[in-house]
Image (cartoon, rainbow, N blue to C red):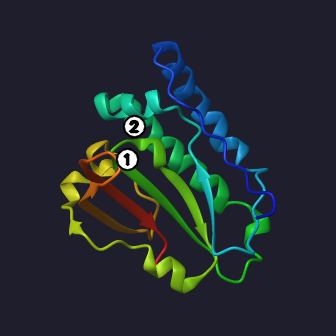
């Protein structure tokens, strides 16, 4: 896949690293103004540049989760404002928030294929709006976005443990 890069930061336990990651989120959102986007695939992800330690911190402290949600919203606003993306025939913007097991997988995704985008609204146990992370932190969801929150469990055969995941997807109507 041309130009696609994935930079993963692995967990650093120090508190300074968590604070540094949270400060960097503002810069990450601004850098999306110049980020490369290739629309020849069905989608394009902009994953949060946080360590697993920061993702775990967001589960423990509301302040950290709020900073992550604000960075995702700010990054989405930057991408929606880009003139070069307006020429793409089909484009939908979405925010994917993974609260459990952690925010390490939270990201902004651009979709370029209608059917693929429609398939991403997950089927599972629907969650009430009171559990919506944006509602819990009194943050505004981008205007016109639809919301899908699900929780599902499965057994990890490799680790031999049950896993529960909570996903929230906020996106343009299909």
Q: Secondary structure at mark 1?
A: loop
- Looking at the image, tell me whether mark 1 or mark 2 is earlier in sequence order: 2
Q: Residues within 10 Å of mark 1 (few under 14, many from 20)?
A: few
Q: Is residue 158 left or right of residue 11?
A: left
Q: Which mark is residue 66?
A: 2
- How far across and down, in percent of the image, does residue 125 sit? 20, 67
In the rendered image, which quarter is residue 149 located in? bottom left
Give above or below for 22 relative to 75.
Answer: above
Does the CB distance between marks 1 and 2 fall below 8 Å? yes
Give above or below for 129 relative to 20.
Answer: below
Q: Secondary structure at mark 2?
A: helix
Q: Quadrant of the N terminus?
A: bottom right
- Determine the residue positioned at 29% across, 54% down: 166
Comparing 52 with 20, the one in front is: 52
Comparing 56 with 68, the one in front is: 56
Label 1 belongs to which residue? 139
- How far across and down, in percent of the image, does residue 83 sit? 77, 65
- Determine the residue positioned at 24% across, 61% down: 152
- Determine the residue positioned at 44% across, 71% down: 144
- How far across and down, in percent of the image, does residue 59 sit? 31, 34
Q: Is residue 61 left or right of residue 26?
A: left
């Amino acid at each position: 896949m041309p130009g696609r890069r994935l930079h993963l930061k692995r967990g650093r336990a120090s508190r300074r690293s968590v604070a540094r990651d949270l400060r960097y989120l503002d810069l990450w959102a601004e850098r999306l103004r110049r980020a490369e986007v290739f629309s020849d695939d069905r989608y394009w992800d902009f994953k949060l540049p946080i360590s697993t330690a920061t993702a775990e911190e967001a589960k423990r402290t509301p302040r950290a989760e709020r900073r992550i949600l604000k960075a995702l919203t700010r990054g989405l606003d930057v991408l929606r404002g880009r003139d070069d993306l307006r020429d793409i025939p089909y484009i939908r913007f979405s925010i994917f928030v993974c609260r459990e097991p952690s925010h390490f997988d939270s990201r902004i995704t651009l979709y370029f294929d209608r059917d693929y985008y429609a398939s991403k609204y997950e089927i599972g146990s629907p969650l009430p709006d009171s559990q919506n992370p944006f509602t819990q932190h009194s943050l505004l969801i981008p205007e016109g976005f639809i919301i899908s929150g699900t929780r599902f469990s499965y057994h990890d055969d490799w680790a031999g443990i049950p896993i529960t995941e909570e996903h929230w997807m906020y996106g343009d109507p299909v």
